[in-house]
Image: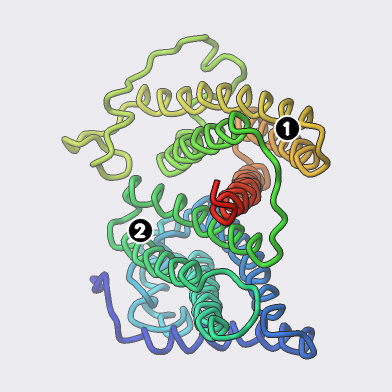
Amino acid sequence: MSTDLIDLAPLAHMALLGSVIALGPLAWLWLRHRGASPTRRLHALTLLTLFLTFDLVLFGAFTRLTDSGLGCPDWPGCYGSASPLGARDEIHAAQSAQPSGPVTQGKAWVEMLHRYVATAVGVLITVMAAMSWWLRRQPAHAPSPWWATLTLAWVVAQGAFGALTVTMKLYPAIVTLHLLGGLGLLALLALQDQAFAPRPMRLSRGLLAGVWVVAGLMLAQVALGGWVSTNYAVLACGDFPTCQGQWWPAMDFPHAFTLRRELGVTAAGAYLPFAALTAIHVAHRMVAVVVLVALALLTWRLHGSGDAGPRRYAVGLALLGLWQLASGLSNVVLGWPMVAAVAHTGGAAVLTMALASLLARAHLRVAASAQRVQVLGV
């Protein structure tokens, strides 16, 4: 049974469902902050959207780990319907043909619930952007509306990558970019949160550069982690600290990091060698050591800065590093349990938000200093 990969017929119904879901958080927010200023309401909406986006990233990891990414093999609906209820016959036929295949009733619901929540988050971000532009005319302190506009454009691009994830049949490079896009969305929302109540943080130029270095290394490690997950390379090494009982097992790096290829095959269409999966896994481990060492040095420097703010960040970053180490090792030695895998993604998401928040506060200080210099004419 064939189905169009992209069928825009259910798009209006999907948008309506997303709006209805978003009405719940918006109504709760309005009632809770009905006596607050518009700026306070926008700040509360930003925090709520940040929280729901974090949940969406975790649910996206769950969708991927349960092999539900193709639970509905078309986009944006499910066999041209807005929900699996309208596609019961098609899903039943696909499940009967392949009981353990990519399309089952359970997987279809997981995939569609992920799309519903993603649509609701998109609605909330649209409301954020509209409120930001409206507040631009008000005498209130709020982030530039261009930040919310960038966030809205970012979430639209995320939706496009979500569509490509389905239509390109879990193409590893697209799935990895989709994961990075989700974390980028969290970073954008965390930056905007800091702009509502500016609390500049004093960091030396060298320490600020160190934060940027750690953020860059973290980005590379998250990309590698996504590459491990999308290629199902976690189980290539079932022991630690060795891999397959060796310190340097047989590895095929050229095939491992060929980006333009489909899932499970080489660029030439042959089956991906197991040595390539081993190379992906070991590369992730090696970069993890570099990231943990850099993170440890950063936390040591932040803790020794003498100010209370950097010291709090130091404690938080240290705990997050330990969380990532523990959850990552659990994935290996326990055989990739669902809880550990989702926890590892969650740790990466929180670490992304923490580093974005830290950079935002440090650059608020830099901007404030530059403004004072300009005013004084120095």
Most distant residue in the left direction: 268
> How many neighbours does mark 2 have within 10 angstroms: few (below 14), some (14-19), or many (20 or more)?
many
Disc 2 marks a residue whose amino acid type is Thr
Q: Secondary structure at mark 2?
A: helix
**On screen, residue 30 above or below 299:** below
Q: In the image, is residue 235 above or below residue 37?
A: above
Q: Quadrant of the N terminus?
A: bottom left
Q: Against 331, is 124 above or below?
A: below
Q: Secondary structure at mark 1?
A: helix
Q: CA distance from mark 2 to mark 1?
A: 39 Å
Q: Write the residue at 42% across / 73% down.
A: 92
Residue 157 lies left or right of residue 21; in this view the side is: left
On the question of residue 109 being in view, the answer is: no
Q: Position of residue 334 (x, y in %)?
A: 66, 32
Residue at position x 32%, y 39% from top?
Answer: 264
Question: Which of the numbered marks, if any, corresponds to residue 165?
Answer: 2
Residue designated by label 1: 302
Depth check, front residue: 103 or 17: 17
Q: Is residue 220 left or right of residue 38?
A: left
